[in-house]
Structure formats: C-alpha cells, structure tokens
Image (tube, coloured by chain):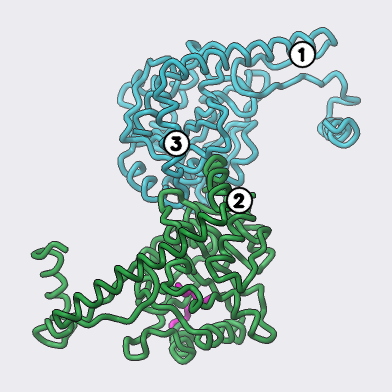
Chain colours: A green, B cyan
Amino acid sequence: AISTALANFMNRVRGNRVKFDPDRIVMSGGATGAHETLAGCLANPGEAFLVPTPYYPAFDRDLRWRTGVELFPVVCESADNFKGHREALETAYKKAKLANVKVKGVLITNPSNPLGTFLDRDTLKDIVNFVNDKSIHLVCDEIYAGTVTNGDEFVSIAEVIEEVPKCNLDLIHLVYSLSKDMGFPGFRVGVVYSYNDNVVSIARKMSSFGLVSTQTQHMLASMLSDNEFVGTFISESRIRLAHRHDMFTRGLAQVGIGSLESKAGLFFWMDLRRFLKEPTFESEMTFWRTIINEIKL
Amino acid sequence: AISTALANFMNRVRGNRVKFDPDRIVMSGGATGAHETLAGCLANPGEAFLVPTPYYPAFDRDLRWRTGVELFPVVCESADNFKGHREALETAYKKAKLANVKVKGVLITNPSNPLGTFLDRDTLKDIVNFVNDKSIHLVCDEIYAGTVTNGDEFVSIAEVIEEVPKCNLDLIHLVYSLSKDMGFPGFRVGVVYSYNDNVVSIARKMSSFGLVSTQTQHMLASMLSDNEFVGTFISESRIRLAHRHDMFTRGLAQVGIGSLESKAGLFFWMDLRRFLKEPTFESEMTFWRTIINEIKL
C-alpha cells in the first residue's frame, strides 16, 4: 500500500507525465540512507562518482563515509548558470582517468541542492547520453521536485530517458524523499527507485538496516492516498515558497543585492561580490568569516 | 524523552538492578542496524569477532555483509549446555591467530538466540575477564532479556562488569531492541548501548542512515513511560511464554521427545536423535530434509 501511495505521489509531483512502478520502490531511512545504498550497490571502495559543483556537502558523508566510494567534482561555472554540461563532464571524466580513478557514475541533484535551479530537458538528455556512451551509472536526486515554483516546468529524468533512443535503463537510478516535498524530515522516508532489477533486489535486502516503521508507513499511506489533501498541499506549498522567494529577491534588489535566478528548493544565492575588498578567494574567505563570526548569520 | 524512556525500560526488564544512562543510548533501525553499526565501529574489513555456536544465522548478513568484518566460530557443545566457556574462547582465539585472523572482539547473545538459554554470572565473568586479558571488545546482544520466564534469574552484562575488578569499560557494548521484549519487530527500534564514549559518538553519527521516525519515537516514549502498562505487559508476557513453553515441553515428553532446558526466548530445541537412522551428520541432513520437504514444517 505504501509503495503504491509513494509511486502515485511521485507521479503527481512530476505533473503525472511519468509513471513510477511501485515494485521498483525501495524505502530507506531518508535520502541519506538511499544515497548510501546506491553508492554501495554501484561502486567499490576507491571507485568514483562525478558530481557537478557546487554540491550538497553532506554527500561526502552519505556516499563516502562507510562505503569508501569517492566523489570527483565536475567544475561548473556561474557563467553558464551552473549547468552540468556535456563538455564539463567529459573534462572531469578525462581528469579522473589521468588520476587513475575509476568512474562508476554521475550524481546530479535536480532541482539542485544548493542552487535551487533545475536542469532543462536538453542538458538532461546530454547527461543521459554521456552515461550511456561511457556505460556508467546515473544517480538523479530529485528530492526537491515538489518545491518547483511552477511544477509544469520541471523535467524529471524519468521523462527524459523515455525520449533518449536506446537508453540502457540499467544505468538509471533515482533518489527521492518526503523530507522536502512534504516537509517530513523527521519521518525518515527515503526512496531508491531504480530501473535496474539487480539494484532493486540488492537495495531491498540492504533496506533491512534502515526500515521505516510499519505504523509510520501506515499513516503515510493513508495521508498520501488522500488525493484532495495532497493536491492542496503541493499547490499551496508552491505558492507560499514562490511568494517568499519573490519577497526576498525584491527586498535584496532594493538594497542593490542581486541573486541567482532559481525556481525550486529552499535555497537562495545572493551575489555579494561588490562587498569584497578585492576579487580574490582570500577576500571571499575574510568576508565569509565576518558573516559567520561577527554578524552571526 | 525517548532515550530516558528506553533507559528506564531497559533497567526495568533487568529487574532494576542496573542503571542505564540515556546519554549512552543510540537508536538504530532494529537490532539489525545496531549490530552492523557496532561491527563497523569496532573492526576493519577482514578482522573478526569470536561467536559461540550455535549462533543467529542472520549475523552473517547483519555484521559481515557490508562491513567486511568476519565471524569466527567458538565451538560450544551440547554436553556443557552450550556455554561459551573460557576454555573454548581461548581455543578459538588461538585457532584464529594460527589462521592469521585478527580477533577484535567476542559477540554473545544472552539470552541465546537460538538456544533460549542464558549464561550464569560466573560464565559472564569469565567472558569479561577474557576480553580484558586480550584487550578485545565484547558485544552482548540482550534483545531477549525481557522474555526470561523468571526475570530475576537473568544476569545482564551491565551487572557483571560492575563486579569485575579493573574491567576496561571501553571494551563493553550492548545491543538491545524492542522487537522481542515488546513484540514490536515492525517498529524497527534497536539500541546500541556502549560504555565507550568514542563508540557512542560515532554510532550516533552513523545512526543518520537508519533513524526511527519522530512520530514513532513520540508514541513509544508515551507507551514506555506508562509504568503500569509496562509492568503488566512484561509480567503477563513472561507468564504466557512460560505457560506455552511448559505445555509444549510436556506434550513432547509424553511422546518420548526430550528438549533442551531453556527459560527465555521464543525458541525450542527438541532432541530428535532417536529418530536418526545412524548417528551421523549425513543422517541428520536426510532427516532435516524430510522435515522441511515432506512434513513441510
């Protein structure tokens, strides 16, 4: 019951343009557990995932700590709106090869944590083609899918793989969670969704280390099956997030502070460059310490 | 709140003769997660724990699968009522050394899964002295503590270490769970209880991979804080288990089948030796297959 309710919820958050199969849903202790499970399934200690920068800092704990799997940064620039372009991936892949690091996959968060942006269909297609060319895995973390201000704009990897000819589905894996989209971090409900039967089967065995309690599953199944409640919750949550984001953007603009254009997530990137004494990394760090230690933000 | 409630419950199940400190309680996804966490904290891949036989078969998954830690059997005989005596531990320790296996600890289940027996105070003291002499760890799984027919007879490792002079408490760790004593397997509430500050701190960080949801914690805290309910539950559960065990023992005795004397757990060991064609292992296996495949027990 909970798998069906979760699959329906995942479909709905993505505008019902894709259909998730309840039998491919493996529950885990939050997205934290889901990421570790996938890392453990897909790579051996010392092998690496390419991760576009900037990335969620806790990935260093979630994926690497107990599995020994490595993360290899894909340098993305603010100039191209931090998109993980094909070229940047190729460069990182070559760099890893030169450093004798075996690359087992690409890990993206879409919508991005920490940027609050999301990738367009073409960029996603590029990434899917890249992993197919190299025969490596793609882990796509979509835990902020429901926070996209206008849900219709967001493109899930689940849509894209249907549009890429000859995509090897065994390479495609999703991480989902109710922590952000439903505001339930304490419920520890994460999901590994894999198109690879072996990964589903092994992840299911691994899930015995961090199962969600049956009574929590029962409560969530009822809650998520209430279509009216879910519909109202998602749309109202989007409206409120957009409103706050807008208020904050305009307020900052009034005092001359620009920000990265974003339409998802709970993040906000201000452009504070004009407050730097010099355009250097040292100056950035000094400014950062002032914010933390003196202003105590 | 949940830590205090759990500590009090753990005390109570052990006749209030010891006092557990809520700050040393780390919750995990069932005893499954607790055992993996401890194995990961105490040993590196390839290093081993000595485990008296027969042992809970799922330890091979729980402790070894993802950590790479090994289990080294301590052969215990039915002749000495399957006690993990000092001598058997010394023999196994030497054997491991000869096999170039680094022993990092001893793992016991007390009350025993699968025997349903429990160790007396002197045997436990022997084991505590053994791990102190060798400077290796002791993991004591007491998840059946509350199923002991007469609770006053059971001796927890927590009592014993107070009576062993100069015991290095950093070596002592407990695994507990509500799955058996409260009949809550689906709630996935396990506990790592360690007297070692480093282990507490690292296990707490690791617990982010399999936390118990806040609403389950909330419900359990209220339930476990209801002293009257808990008292009635534990004593009634003990009475009913004893009654069923007694009925089953007497029924089997009437048809001439003996059984291992046990006073805990949900297990029952029948002596079916007289049904063997020959006193050999092959004959045992043939008989076992008959039970499984033909009688379909």
In the image, residue A108 lies in the stretch drawn in magenta: yes
- Residue type beneath disc 3: Val
B57 displayed left or right of A91: right
Q: Which residue is tagged 1?
A: B258
Q: Secondary structure at mark 3?
A: strand
- Residue type beneath disc 1: Gly
Q: Quadrant of the C terminus of chain B?
A: top right
Q: Which residue is tagged 3?
A: B191
Q: Whole-percent x and y of residue A27?
A: 57, 54
Label 3 crowd bin: few (<14), some (14–19), many (20+), radius 10 Å: many
Q: Whole-percent x and y of residue B52?
A: 58, 31
Q: Chain of mark 2?
A: A
Span of residues in magenta = A97-109
Q: Residue at x 44, y 29 (%)?
A: B130
State how far apart marks 2 and 1 are (Cα).
Answer: 45 Å
In the image, residue B237 lies in the stretch drawn in magenta: no
Q: Chain of mark 1?
A: B
- Residue type beneath disc 2: Ile
Q: Which residue is tagged 2?
A: A2
Q: Secondary structure at mark 2?
A: helix
In the rendered view, tell whether residue A81 sits above or below residue A149.
Answer: below
Q: Residue at x 39, y 61 (%)?
A: A61
